[in-house]
Amino acid sequence: MDPTTKTRLRVGGVVALAVAVAIAALAWRSADPEGARSAPPQEYVPVGPEVPYVSTREDVLDEMLRLAMVTKDDLLYDLGCGDGRIVITAAKRFGTRGVGVDIDPRRIEESNENARKAGVTKLVKFVEGDLFGTDLSRATVVTLYLLPDVNMRLRPKLLKELKPGARVVSHNYHMGHWKPTKETQLDDHMVYLWVIPEKGGATPR
C-alpha cells in the first residue's frame, strides 16, 4: 500500500471515529435525566387559582360578618369569593352591597346563579379576575379566605388602597406583624379583624 493511500485511510478513520463519538454523546445526553434537568428553567406563569376552593363554614361566615359589624351602608369585597356565599349572605341579611372576585370562571357562574336564587342580584356583582389587580379603594369591608403567603402579598395593597376605618376580615390566616384588632376562635377555625389605620399612623413592618 502506497503512503498516500495509508494517509487517506488514517484520516478517514479519525473522522469516522469523531462522528461516532459525537452521535453517542448526543444520545447519552438525550437519555440522561440529569442532562434534562440542567436545561435553563422556564419562567412559571400561573394560569389558575393560587388558592384551592374551600367554602367557608356557615358559623365562621356569621362570625366574620359580626366581627366586621357589616351594615347596609357598607360595600363589601370578597377576594376569592368561591360560590359567593359571603357577599350573598351580607346582602340578604343586612342589605349590604357587595362585589365578589374570583379568577375561576366556574365560581363566578356559580355565584351569579346563587345570587339569582337568593334574589339579591341588584345588590351584588361578581367579577372574574385577579384579586391583586382589583381596585379596592371603594370597599369598606374586605373578606378573605386565602393562604398565609397570599395574605402577606396582599397586605401592602390593602394598606395602600383602603380608606382609614375600612375593615379587613380573614378566615384562619393572619397578616404577619400586623396585629389584629380582634380575633375569635370557633373550634379549630380562627377569624381575624384588622382596621385600616389613619394615614401616617403606625403600619406593620
Image: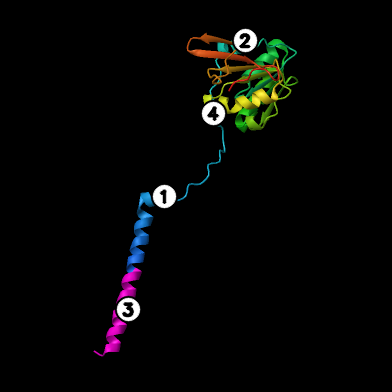
Of badges 2 and 1, nearer the viewer stands 1
Mark 4 vs mark 2: which is more N-terminal? 4
Q: Which picture quadrant has residue 53?
A: top right
Instruction: Report, in whole angstroms, how far the alpha carbon at label 4 lies from the one at label 3.
Output: 63 Å
Mark 4 vs mark 1: which is more N-terminal? 1
Q: Are marks 4 and 1 in contact (CB under 8 Å)?
A: no
Q: Are marks 2 and 1 in contact (CB under 8 Å)?
A: no
Q: Mark 4: which secondary structure? A: loop
Magenta segment boundaries in residue numbering: 1-19
Is the residue 7 above or below the residue 82 in the image?
Answer: below
Which image quarter is the N terminus in? bottom left
Mark 2 vs mark 1: which is more N-terminal? 1
Instruction: Report, in whole angstroms, how far the alpha carbon at label 3 lies from the one at label 1.
Output: 35 Å
Q: Are marks 3 and 1 in contact (CB under 8 Å)?
A: no
Task: Say the numbered circle drawn on residue 38.
Answer: 1
Q: Circle 3 sits on which residue?
A: 12
Q: Mark 2: which secondary structure? A: helix
Q: Are marks 3 and 2 in contact (CB under 8 Å)?
A: no
Q: Circle 2 sits on which residue?
A: 67
Q: Residues within 10 Å of mark 2 (few under 14, many from 20)?
A: many
Q: Residue at x 44, y 51 (%)?
A: 39
Q: Mark 1: which secondary structure? A: loop
